[in-house]
Image (cartoon, grey):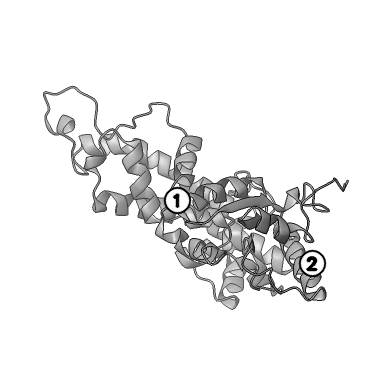
Amino acid sequence: MRRTIQNAWNYKNIISKAKMGHKSILIVEGIDDVKKFNLIKQSIDRKIEVKSIGSFENYYKEKGAEYVMDFIEKLIEYHQSNNSHDYIGYILGIVDRDSICYERKETKENDLLYVLDYYSLESYYINKEVIEKTLSTVITNPDLINDNIVSSLYDEVLTKSIENLYYISLEALKKSCDSSYSAIIGYKPDNIINFLNHDSLPSKKNDLDIFAQNKGLEKDINTALKIIKGKWFISSFRDIYLEKIKELEELCKNGEIRQCDNCSIDEISEPCLYKPRDVKLQEHNIEEIIFTLIDLDSLTPIKNRIKKLK
């Protein structure tokens, strides 16, 4: 149920509120995005407030790109109808690309709207730099880390993640593009573990390969970042990465990677220095660490757009 409260934020007063507070406003899709962008803004020399679309009048508890875009359109129409042109530079709506570009839906990008290049913000944390920076935080002796270890971990984690998610993502994408298509799954669920080994998926792979070819898609990282739902991707990436971290001790003992001092000498019974500092390290710990990384090269395009605000 929608409600109106006194002094509520809306498209009519947001500019004046921004000016009075001497700040710019980022409008994002949901509460989870607010948390992530509040971290990202720490590396940007601007006074910025991040608000979810669900905090605005007539949009209470709503979330998603369509509502952000609707709000931005109304804001522009309102100010243009009043011959006001000083709204540019104070507001920026940021929305996930999702599957919009493949559905041939019109995205009215303008000076107040930024559509991410990848499926969603989570997709920007799928890269080699994340492995390098999180690994140095997690293991006992970060000095052991070298490019060979980082590259090997990244290649294994990425390859397995794409292998797990590519066809289920094509299935969801095809459903988005054709509402009449009888799909195993769409993009709506955040947890897809019960769908990954669905009985009917193997029989669909040939048709999905043809669909991908017609869309110019290939089974690689560039396609994966655009068609795999960000929450699916980061969850798989995180889980497989944790498995690989826990395998480092055995690899070190067997001399399959650069050995730590303790494992290189048989007489020493001290723990392997690849051992996680936190013996109770879990998937959610890894994810929390990942999202604290605000200086990733992958985030530069987003930060550069935000920096254009006043």
Residue 278: which quarter of the image?
A: top left
Q: Is residue 262 depicted above or below 55 in this figure?
A: above
Of 114 and 259, nearer the camera is 114
What residue do we see at 60% from left, 63% from top? 170
Q: Is residue 152 depicted above or below 239 in this figure?
A: below
Residue picked out by circle 2: 74
What residue do we see at 82% from left, 75% from top? 81
Of 296 and 175, nearer the camera is 296
Looking at numbered disc 2 in the image, what kind of residue is underneath it? Lys
Of 63 and 154, nearer the camera is 63
Near mark 1 (Cα within 10 A), the count class, few <14, some 14-19 or many ≥20, is many
* Residue 8 in the image, given as x and y percentages of width and height: 80, 49
Regarding residue 282, the answer to whether it shows in the image is yes
* Residue 281 in the image, given as x and y percentages of width and height: 42, 31
80 sits left or right of 215 in the view:
right
Q: Is label 2 in a helix, a strand or a loop?
A: helix
Residue 286: which quarter of the image?
A: top left
Q: Is residue 257 depicted above or below 250 in this figure?
A: below
Q: Residue 294 carries which label?
A: 1
Regarding residue 181, the answer to whether it shows in the image is no
Residue 230: which quarter of the image?
A: bottom right
